[in-house]
Amino acid sequence: MISPRYHREIPQRYRLEAAKCTGCGKVLFPPRKICPQCGGEAFAPTVLPTRGKVVTHTTIWIPPAAFEDQKPYVVAVVELENGVRLTCMVADAPPDEVTIGTPVELIFRRIQKESAWGVLQYGYKARVIPA
Amino acid sequence: MYGIVGYGSYVPRYRIRAEDIARQWGADAEAYKKGLLLEEKTVPGPDEDTITISVAAARYALQRAGIDPQEIGACYIGSESHPYAVKPSGTVVIDALGLGPVCHVADFEFACKAGTEAMFVAYSHVKAGEMKYALGIGADTSQGAPGDALEYTASAGGAAYIMGGDNVAAEIVYTYSYTSDTPDFWRREGEFYPRHAGRFTGEPAYFHHVLNATRGILELSSMKPEDFRFAVFHMPNGKFPLRAGKILGFRQEQLEQGWVVNLMGNTYSGSSPTGLAACLDVAKPGDQILVTSFGSGAGSDSFIIRCTKRLAEIQRKAPAVRDQLADRRIHLDYGKYVAYRGKIRMNVT
Amino acid sequence: MRDVAVVGVGMTKFGELWETPLRDLFAEAALACLKDAGVERGEVQSAYIGCMSGGLFVGQEHLASILCDYAGLNPMAATRVESACASGGAAFRAAWLEVASGASDFVLAGGVEKMNDGADATYCLATAADQEYEVYHGVTFPGLYAMIANAHMHKYGTTPQQLAAVAVKNHHNGTMNPHAQFSMEINIETVLKAVRVAEPLGLFDCSPVTDGAAALLLCPVEVAKELGKPLVKILGAGAATDTIALHDRADLAAIPVVGRAAQRAYEMAGVKPKDVDFCEVHDCFTIAEIVCTEELGLFERGRGGPAAAEGLTALDGKRPVNPSGGLKSKGHPVGATGCAQLVEVYQQLTGRAGKRQIKSPRLGLAQNMGGSGGSATVHILEVNR
């Protein structure tokens, strides 16, 4: 039963809420107890920008069971405009549309279903921004 | 003055052509295309549903409205394909948009009319002075049974409307509803696909309610078809809205801009809301738009909308309907289509 | 800190061992190890056993108790060690520290994994990555390494053929290893045409799903001399951790945790990469071997691919890598791998590697890695003839 963990992640998954270290300015996504850069323990709330670019990617041909209906799909490490990187699927993307450097924006999609009877899980994916 | 302060529509990228559905069933593609006046329809991606479509449309509406989401006092989603049988779509949408937690949320359903219901109630709250802004969304990812005529038309998409009293871009001048128990199309609890009563869905259902609602609002407002630049009628297929418009005395030019069905299919609760958005995308200050929705079961909601100068300021702040309809479409073959629509029995736990 | 030696080794065959449950796999390796060392069960004072997830694969935790129970080692002290795919190396490190500290004289270092009892291996292995921010989004293990491969190819021009050369070499070495899961030659074509897993990695770029166990007995150097064993000393030991998520690392075409662990091991041993005669490297995927050979300082950054293709890492090459056949053909029972690598190092150093024997090696290195590079151990062993 995924509910407690899923509910806790909603601010990050739905709204890209992050934490900015008040000491060195590093933005942490997700927020943490301690800044890995300066060791600071004080943070201010911030929200990630939605635009960025692909820094590496792959096409998954053999997925985990929960993603069987979406194969093959592209996943990428995306670097956002503020330097924060995250990992997500690239939605609506024929594999040849995605290369290193492709500009993308983050959108809201359903990420997984907890089988046929469980909770629907939503979150961010990337989408190619056309030239 | 109360009405629309922001609007947005979302069109998925995937399509399937009428020919590819016809080929699967050995049907006459040309006959279907002529009979339905439809080329292709939208298909939701395997990661899309009414909730994700609602969020996408509402984000565009917020972009146009330029307001703080926290000032929205209510959020209503109207759909025939809410992802859960029990658990609201609206709660996911408000958390994704940053509305709430101080917000009234409800899911609406009434076949294809659920979208305009959401708009109707949102507008009423604001007009009554209950809250500063309210959001009404119509979105669907409805299913057509394999091999059935509805498979050519049942599609996906949605539109969102933020109602308010400040900076109104399109005033809602009149509303009118006409409803009666008419069992033309339904789905019982536990059934996967809906059923319909064939030709009964025409005269006694669609036309009876659409014509009566429209005539009712014209009488209420003392207006005539000539007073409108655009008219939008619910689009279950390409033919019905054009015929309704003609019967009521509207000209083809008034019907064209909102007539998205030939490229999009029937987005059910998103149908007339999307047609309206397509008109708002190009309307000029002073233009009047008439919208009549239809939901099987059955009923129609009508609106008379008058555009203001503010509309010109916000139109281009988010993607237009017809740009999305034309842009970077991905056409699926029938196999990929049924896989994405969950019609294949997969071996997943 | 005392100097520590390895005085005996044992391992099971690696493969799909349908008849052998988890508890017996470890027993087999442990008992073979003790026989090899000539040491009685009752003399062993402590054990560290690496296992990534008895819980997820077979529903069994509390491995310290059950594995020692079934190996006849109760009431000895024991600890199960976990560091994803680096569990075996981490167990060896812990065993080394207990002997080096003077706390115990005989400590068993082992590793075991039972992956073929019907668990969803993809799901279990993915727990080595970031559950919420990588795996949640549909990334698989091969997917993470595929992204490293694409970054490496983009930055250095590494080619799919160079990746394939690693698999071909390791399969060739595996034909000479009686414990290996696969004993067949393959060619570049086979690798390039194999079923796609995560672009650019295909089935033959990925190590298999394997059952198996391996164990080594450690004791102080003085005791090893008394036993009359060839003197194989732990000369260098290094370990490090790095971010769990690939996206939090500065250079996606590198695996810096390996470089850090290696640096610590080289420093302690007082040797340089070129002094090492051969390496057992963690080739969970072909790209992993290429990047790790760069991290270990065997080749310059970006040159790992060409080196493999040019035969530099072959058994008879200048820098032999994975004489055992590597994870690719020997098999990768996750928790056991780190120990199995060290077993190979010991066998090579003591001249017992049969057809795949490297000529008179003095120094051998074993590098074990967890996840996409979240943890690593590097051990350097030296034989004094």
Image (cartoon, coloured by chain):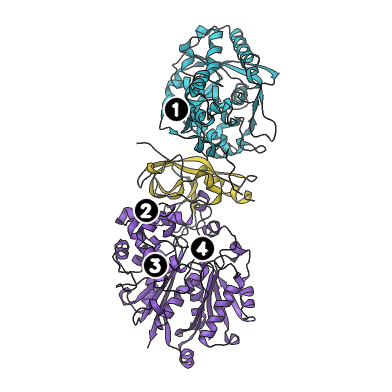
Q: Which mark is residue C209?
A: 4
Is B165 located above or below residue B47 in the figure?
A: above
* Closer mark to the observer between disc 2 and disc 4: 4
Question: Are dots 3 and 2 in contact, CB under 8 Å?
Answer: no
The residue type indicated by label 4 comes to Val
Residue A107: percent from the left, percent from the top?
A: 48, 40
The circle on residue C350 is none
Chain in cyan colour? B
The residue shown at (39%, 38%) is A129
Q: Is residue C307 left or right of residue C370?
A: left
Mark 2 highlights which residue?
C150
Instruction: Please tell me how crowded label 1 is: few (under 14), some (14-19), or many (20+) other residues with Cα within 10 Å.
Output: many
How many C-alpha atoms fall within 10 Å of the one at disc 3: few (<14), some, or many (≥20)?
A: many
Q: Secondary structure at mark 4?
A: loop
Find the distance from the CA under tag 2 to the CA under tag 1. 34 Å
Which residue type carries mark 3?
A: Asn
Where residue C96 sits in the image (x, y, percent)? 49, 79
Q: Closer to the camera: disc 1 or disc 3?
A: 3
Viewer-nearest of labels 3 and 2? 3
Q: Which residue is mark 1?
A: B325
Q: Amino acid at mark 1?
A: Leu
Q: CA distance from mark 1 to mark 4?
A: 47 Å
Front in this rendered view, residue B184 or C316 = C316
What is the distance, in whole Å, between disc 4 and disc 3 at their CAs?
16 Å
